[in-house]
Amino acid sequence: MSGVCKWCRLGVKILSASLAIEVLMLLLLLASTSAVSNSRLEALFHLRLDEVGKLFNASLSGPLASQDLATLQDVLDALRNEEAISYLVLVNNRGQRVAASGWAESKELPQPMAKPVIGKRFDASLPITLAASHYGTLHYGVETALLAEAQQTLLARGALIAGLEVLLSAIALSLISLLLTRRLVRLSEAAETIAKGDLSIRVPVGDKDEVGKLAVSFNAMADALYARMRALALSEEKFSKAFSGSPDAMIITDSESHILDVNAAFERIFAMPRREALGAQVSVLCAADCAQALDKIIGSPDSISGSEIVLTRGDGKMLSCLISSDNIELAGSACRISILRDISARKEIEAALERSNHDLEQFAYVSSHDLREPLRMISSYVSLLERRYADKLDDDAREFIAYAKDGAERMNRLILDLLDYSRATRDDKPFAAFNLSSALQGALDNMQLLIGESQATITNDGALPQVAGNITQITRLFQNLIGNAIKYRSPDRPLVISIKAAPSDHQWTISVADNGIGIDQQYFERIFMIFQRLHGRGVYEGTGIGLAVCKRIVEHHKGRIWVKSEPGVGSTFLFTLPAIDGTP
C-alpha cells in the first residue's frame, strides 16, 4: 500500500505486538518452569540422600560389628564408585577417623551443607548406629553434575518448545494479519479511488465479522455519496443551463461584492463584456448616483425579491430593472446571486398606455360634455315643436315626437353616465388611511330616501377595517353596490343586505351580499363591462355602467372585484383592498 512505511503497517504492528506478548509470556513460563524444576530436583535429591543413608547404614553394620577394617575399607570404596559419591570418611563418636575413601587423611573435613547447589559438590554427614547405639558419623560428598545435566535438558527442551511455539504463533498471526490487513487495504484503496472521483468502486463484504460490517457500511456510504454527487451534478447542470440561458442578467458576487461570474444576458443588458466584469465591484455597472443603491441591495445579508431600481449604464442609457438577490454557497464560500430583469420596455409601454388612457378619458370627458349642448338644443326644439303645433299634428306625428324626446333623454342619460365613468378615478388626491365604516356611512346617508322606499334592511357584522385609499371613491363604490342590490331586489321577500370584511394575505376582502333575484353564472364577467345590461329597459332602468364604475374604482386601488350568485337566492359582490402595513 503506497504512502505507508514498512514498519508502520497495521499487520506489522499486530504481528510485532502479538509476538512480543508471546515471547514475554514464554519467558515467564520458562522462568516459572525452571523454578519448579529446581525445587522438584532438590526434593528428589534429598529423597535420594535418604535412600543412600539407609544403604550406608546397612552396608557398614556388618564390618563394624566384626571390626574388620579391611572389609570396611572395601565397602567404602565400593560405595564411592557405585553411587557417584566423591568421598566417604567414617569418624567414630570420639572424633577418630576409622576409614576413608577418596579423601586425604590430612585434609580437614568440610562442614555439611543445608541445600545442594547444582553444579557443585554437596557435602553431607550421616549418623551411623551400631547395635542401636550411636557409633559415629559418616562424612561424604555427592556430585551434582547429574542434576545440572537434568536441569539443562529441561531448559533446552523448554526453550525448544518455546521457540517452536513462537514460530507457529508468528506463522498463524502472519496469516491472520494478512487476511485482516488485506481486507483493510482494499477498503483503503477503495477510499483513495473515491477520493480521486471514481464513485463506482465497491468492496467485497466477505465474512460477516467487524471488517465485513465495515465493508457494508463503506459500500452504503459510497452509494449515498454517489446518489448525492449525482443529484449535485444534475443540480449544477440545471443551474448552469438556467444561468447561461436566462434572459435576465445574473450576477454572482462574493462577500465583498466582487463579481465572480455573469451570464450572457448580463453582457447584453449592461453592454459590458464578461472579462471586464469579472473581479470588479458591482458599482462599476452603473453611474455613481445609483451605484450606492445597487450595492446596498446586492451587499445586503437579507433575501430581496422584486425590488424595482433605476440604473444609469456607463454609456448613459437608463435602465428600469426588477432585482432579486439572495445568499448561496459555492465551493464552501458564502456568495450572493442577483437577478436583474430589464423592464425598461415594459415601463415605456405602461407610460404610453397611461398617457393613452388619460387622453381617452380626457376625450370622453370633453366629448361627453360637448355633446350635451347640441342634445339640449334638439330636445328643446322638439319640445317647442310639440307645444306650438300640437293641435296641427296627427297621432303619428305626436308619436314620432315622443320617440324623439325619449331618444334624446336616453342619449342624455348615456352621456351623463359616460361622464360619470370618465370621472370615476379622476380625483388625484393621494391615498390616505380611513375607516371603511366612514365610507359606508357616507353611502347610506346619500341613499337614505331610496333605502327607505325599498324598506331594505342593511347589516354590518362587526367593525370594518382601516384601509388606505380615496374615501370619496370607496363611498361611491358602496353606493353603487347597495343601489344595485336595491334595484334587483326580489318581489317575494323583504330585502336584506349584509356587509362584511375578512382578512386575507396582506389585504381585506369586503363582501356585499343580498337576497335579490340573483345572476346566472354565465354573466359573471359580462356584468362588469361598460354599457352591458342583462334586462330590457322596460324591466329595469339604467344604462349598465354602475358595476363598470365599481370595477374601475377597485382596480384603481390595486384590488379586484368578482361576484358569487345563484338565481332566485341572491348575489354576493366581493372586492379586495390592500391592507395598511401591519394589518390584517
Image (spheres, helix red, strand yellow):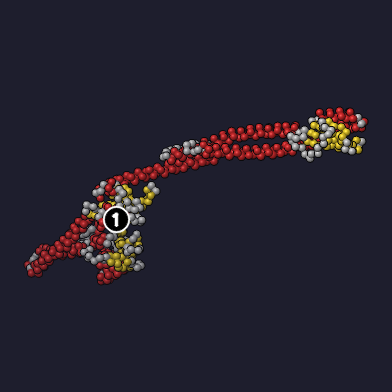
Quadrant for residue 408, please give it: bottom left
Element type where label 1 sits in the image: helix
Residue 276 can be seen in this image = yes
* Mark 1 lies on residue: 294
In this picture, is 531 found above or below 200? below
Task: Give the camera-side residue of 246 and 565.
Answer: 246
Total marks placed? 1
Amino acid type indicated by mark 1: Leu
Residue 305 can be seen in this image = no
Task: Give the camera-side residue of 530 and 303.
Answer: 303
Task: Give the camera-side residue of 259 and 150.
Answer: 150
Query: On the rendered structure, is 61 left or right of 298?
Result: right
Considering the image in quadrants, where does the C terminus appear? bottom left
Give the percent coordinates (x, y) of residue 244.
30, 45
Residue at the (57%, 38%) spot, across then down: 16
Residue at the (85%, 35%) spot, across then down: 138
Query: On the rendered structure, is 91 left or right of 500?
Result: right
Task: Give the camera-side residue of 561 and 27.
Answer: 27
Residue at the (24%, 53%) spot, across then down: 313
Give the percent coordinates (x, y) of residue 493.
31, 65
Residue at the (54%, 35%) spot, across then down: 178
In this picture, is 571 found above or below 342? below
Give the percent coordinates (x, y) of residue 146.
75, 32
Q: Residue furthest front?
A: 106
Other-residue count near label 1 (Cα within 10 Å), few / some / many at <14 / 14–19 / ≥20: some
